[in-house]
Amino acid sequence: MASKKGMHRNRGGSGSRFPIAVVIFVSIFAPLLFFVGRGIYATTSFDQENIAASSIKQELNWREKLALQNVKSLFSREVIDVIKANTNDLGPLSLDSFRKNNLSASWKFVRQEIPADKISSLTEAEAAKIVQETPKGKDAAHVQFVDTPAKLARRQLREKKREKRAADLVKQDDEVTVKLENDAIERSKSVDSAVLGKYNLWRKENDNDNSDSTVRLIRDQIIMARVYVSIATMKNQTDLARELQNRIKESQHALRDASSDSDLSPSAAEKIKAMGQVLSKAKEKLYDCKLVTGKLRAMLQTADEQVRSLKKQSTFLSQLAAKTIPNGIHCLSMRLTIEYYLLSPEKREFPRSENLENPKLYHYALFSDNVLAASVVVNSAIINAKEPEKHVFHLVSDKLNFAAISMWFLLNPPGKATIHVENVDEFKWLNSSYCPVLKQLESAAMKAYYFKSDHTTTAGSSNLKYRNPKYLSMLNHLRFYLPQVYPKLDKILFLDDDIVVQKDLTGLWSVDLNGNVNGAVETCGESFHRFDKYLNFSNPHIARNFDPNACGWAYGMNIFDLKEWKKKDITGIYHKWQSMNEDRVLWKLGTLPPGLMTFYRLTHPLDKSWHVLGLGYSPTVDKTEIDNAAVIHYNGNMKPWLELAMTKYRSYWTKYIKFDNPYIRSCKLSE
């Protein structure tokens, strides 16, 4: 009874209603109150802002108004104040998010003083000022998740800084790219190559970057087909291997010697498609990553060995081609030789022999076994001489070509100039007991070096140019015996037979050599063509006597003071070094290294315009330098009388050939 009364008291008492109301509030009305409370909060907050409150009230629809009325009718003012106090920290919800029931929507700041469309046009100074005026500490809590003008200004500042940094980086990247391209172009210009290919990455006229993409595709297909042929054969897939072989032959036939897509036949596209289908089938049946990788590696190694072998063969053939006399010149030499021996002895003499030992005239020394080359040197020098009658040409040849060169100048005398031809084999004083080179050439070791086919164990065999047959000829070494050949002369200008004279050279005889023996144009750059390029400085004799950074100079056009030569015993110095180099331990072969040693500190540098080199190996010799040069030199393998000569330089040489000469016409020599 007591319990029932208690229950009755609890049910009827005023204090018992509040827990029940709380339970009902939590379970039923809490969600509704959350949103409505937020709305009440927003409404109450917006009452403080007259303009904003009026706009929000206009946008509330009838459902929102009805919900607010129902909630206010259910709860007292105190309960609503509690709800408002518990939702103050959430901030006002935007009307858009409230309508869409999307709690994750962006907040809207009602007190936006700066229009959004004007913020993007703020300057950095204005944006920085807004950032400084942004509330800090507790005042900033209200705008923590709000896109305030300060936030927008800061964002604008960051975006402008990012854009500026990106523009700077792009500019730097463009500058670096242009610099790399220009550097690569300059490096490609400085490369000396005897084989000038049709395709060059840095050629400006190569407008189509993918001009050979189809050619490369065909080659790649052939490589993969060969890989699968090997794998198919190994796995007894004979039909597939045979089909691949047939496709390889078809692709090779379509490719032929094509170097660009324009060279391909119209049927190439069909061949590519057919090969692609077979390769796809082979891949499905045979592909094994390990096997394919192994086969490709083996093919790469084989190709590398072939490249090395072909490179060595190419070097040998280029050296051989450079020293081979073309058929036309050989024909000319034979016809002239026959005509010479048909002459009577008295008709073989050259006029004006009294000038040969006159030291007051301008004397030239030319040693050659090439009748056409010798004719160009003499003809070009005489045509450009101001006083041809004062020029004397001393030509020396070997016994094989002596008659031909003599006959040419008997038939084509050099105008008022004087010319004389001699045979080096008739110089009886030039023998092995006097000349170290002749003595060395008679040794068994030197004969083995030159004439044995297998040089795999021979020192220096890796560089075939040092075994050039020209080093066996005394014509090449006669330049070290000029006072012995011309004992009555004081000065002489030495010329190689691969040069062309373009200006009067008489000024060279008046150059003051300052007590030196040799006047020559220096060839060294910062580190190019210095002594260490030619001499073996690991040898103590070389290291003790020479400076590795000493500047090299050019043989081919040299003015020699023969009086100083005799005083300083230049020929004796040459003999000393030549005798020490019997085993080729000081330098390889040739005449420039011993010349550098013999005339060390005895060479006077001439102005570079006297002598321009490189027309026989470099495609980048400046045209202005060529046109202004007194002498141009085709040093290198690409001589102007050979088919491998560079076309751009050949006209400087051919302009001095008399193509209307009946002997030249009969031997079919043409421009």
Image: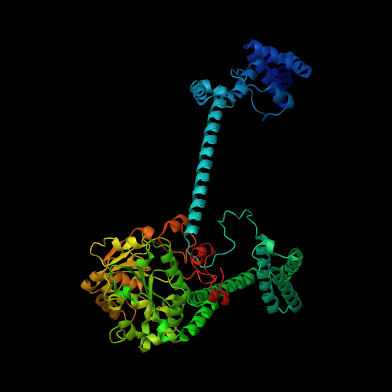
Farthest residue to the top: give it: 50
Name the residue at 48% across, 53% down: 183
Horizontally, is 420 left or right of 65 in the view?
left
Counting from the top left corner in percent of width and height, residue 108 is at 64, 23
Relative to 486, is 126 above or below? above
Q: Give the residue drawn at x 53%, y 67%.
A: 195
Residue 478 figure quarter: bottom left
Q: Can see residue 254?
A: yes
Which residue is rendered at x = 25% and y = 77% of the image?
572
Of 338 and 159, the residue lying toward us: 338
Q: Which residue occupies the foreground of this view, 148 or 671?
A: 671
Asked if residue 251 is positioned above or below residue 13 in the image, the reply reads below
Q: Position of residue 118 (x, y in %)?
A: 60, 22
How many callouts does the rendering have?
Answer: 0
Figure quadrant of the N terminus: top right
When the figure is inspected, residue 31 is found, relative to residue 316, above or below; the finding is: above
Quarter-of-image position of residue 104: top right
519 with respect to 115 (left or right): left
Looking at this view, name the residue that lies furthest to the bottom. 444
- Is 637 displayed left or right of 198 in the figure? left
Using the image as rendered, state which of residue 353 and residue 524 is in the foreground. 353
Residue 658, percent from left and from top: 51, 69
In the picture, which quadrant includes the C terminus?
Answer: bottom right
Q: Nearer the viewer, residue 121 or 4?
A: 121
Residue 79 at least partly seen? no
